[in-house]
Amino acid sequence: MGIFRFPAACTLLVAALALGACNRQPTESAGAEAAATPHIPGPALDSLNARNAVALLTAYGQQYPGSEVVLHTTLGDIGLRLYDDTPLHRANFLLLARKKFFDEGGFYRIVQDFMIQGGDDDDRRMALGAYKLPPERRPGHFHKRGALAMARFSDAENPKKESSNHDFYIVQGKTFSDAELDEIARITAITFSPAQRQAYKTIGGAPALDAGYTVFGEVTRGLEVVKKIADTPVDAQKWPIKEVLMKVEVVK
């Protein structure tokens, strides 16, 4: 099973509402509210595009580094550590977190014993430019339980396996036997290292995803919260019956 990005269903509705808002005259209170909003360094999210994203994110990551993030969800906190050797994915996640992009959404796709996916919402008002992230798959980063990775479009639409710019997921997964890992390796042409096999047999994960998705961080605390979210009742489309909202804070 893959982790694919699903387009928001209400894009036209949101666009229509935004157009209506643009035609209104700004009020004095609205101007005062805008003036009180603190400036957050970094490029404007809607200025990023396929031509400039790599350069802008590289510069941003060098100027404004970070490695520790907390997801404050309605079911508890999840601590995350972002990897240094996936600099574009790290810088992108830090930028969106600091700009409060993730705070307008929550976990919208939940598959028990597999993963919880978030970063998007049909009611989002904050605009984000159209760009993808080049893959930064590293041999030492794999889909063990608690891995943080980026979703993407399917191979047919996305043969370069580029990552989404905002849809991320956290692996819950399950444990696998050697025979099951051998079968996954045969189908996907993945060669699992001894460390990967040990992890998948003991703590669990989602080994089939190692063939095509960038892991750029991991859970440092709050795996019990990941389980709570994974246990949330969902509908036939794997959407949670009750929203699991989040606020994302960069702490270091």
Image (tube, rainbow, N blue to C red):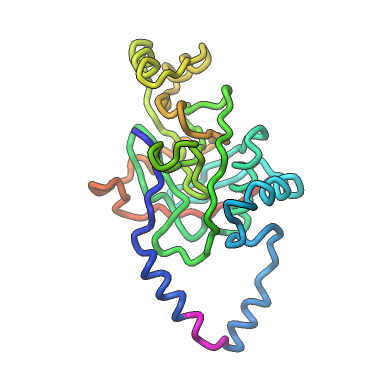
| Above or below for 162 versus 28 | above
Would residue 219 be found to the left or right of residue 187 on screen?
right
Q: What residue sits 64% from the left and 46% below the top? A: 54
Q: Is residue 228 visible?
A: no
218 or 61, nearer to the observer? 61
| Above or below for 217 versus 132 | above
What range of the chain is rendered magenta?
21-26
Residue 32 placement (x, y as % from top left): 64, 82
Q: How many marks?
A: 0
Would residue 95 be found to the left or right of residue 214 on screen?
right
Residue 193 placement (x, y as % from top left): 51, 14
Residue 185 placement (x, y as % from top left): 40, 16
Q: What residue sits 38% from the left and 57% below the top? A: 8
| Above or below for 90 versus 98 | above
Q: Main secondary structure of the magenta part?
A: loop
Would residue 109 be found to the left or right of residue 252 on screen?
left
Tell me the quarter of the picture where residue 252 sits: top right
Residue 13 placement (x, y as % from top left): 36, 70
Tell me the quarter of the picture where residue 40 sits: bottom right
